[in-house]
Amino acid sequence: MKSGSPQRVTHGRNGMNFNNFTIKSQEAYQKAEEIARARQNPAVETSHLLKAMLISEEDVIPYLLKKLDVNLEKFSNDLDGIINAYPKVSGGDTHPSSTVIKSLQKATALSQESGDG
């Protein structure tokens, strides 16, 4: 269920309309974008999105991973290694990768199927 008004609206060449996402989802994507930009990655990848969710204030992802007996420090370090291996560019805007677009489209479809969209 969507709540409140979005902090930022993103309509891109990729056709993604982030107005269709919850505020928390928009915040997670914005954080992923910040991570990509800070590391000079031109595309926001699923690893950026996972990292953003991992460090969110809600602590939902860390809680679930702990329940699965995942070593959070190793997981986070491995995730950083993946992100650090992405290409770097100076300047320019970040954009969602095709993998992120497909993932978000699938999440939207699953949400609608479950009656949560």
Image: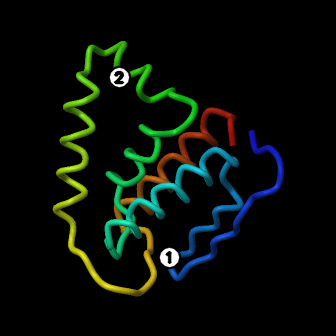
Q: Work out whether mark 2 precedes mark 1 in sequence or the reverse, and give the earlier one.
A: 1
Q: Residues within 10 Å of mark 1 (few under 14, many from 20)?
A: few
Q: Which residue is mark 1?
A: 14
Q: How far from the left and from the top, in percent, is residue 70?
A: 25, 21
Q: Which residue is mark 2?
A: 65
Decide if residue 23 is on the left or right side of residue 91: right
Most foreground residue, 46 or 88 = 88
**Residue appearing at x 25%, y 30% in the figure:** 73
**Residue appearing at x 38%, y 45% in the figure:** 50
Residue 66 sits in quarter: top left
Residue type pointed to by label 2: Leu
* Color encoding of the figure: rainbow
Q: How far from the left and from the top, in percent, is residue 23?
A: 70, 48
For label 1, the SS is loop
> Label for residue 117?
none
For label 2, the SS is helix
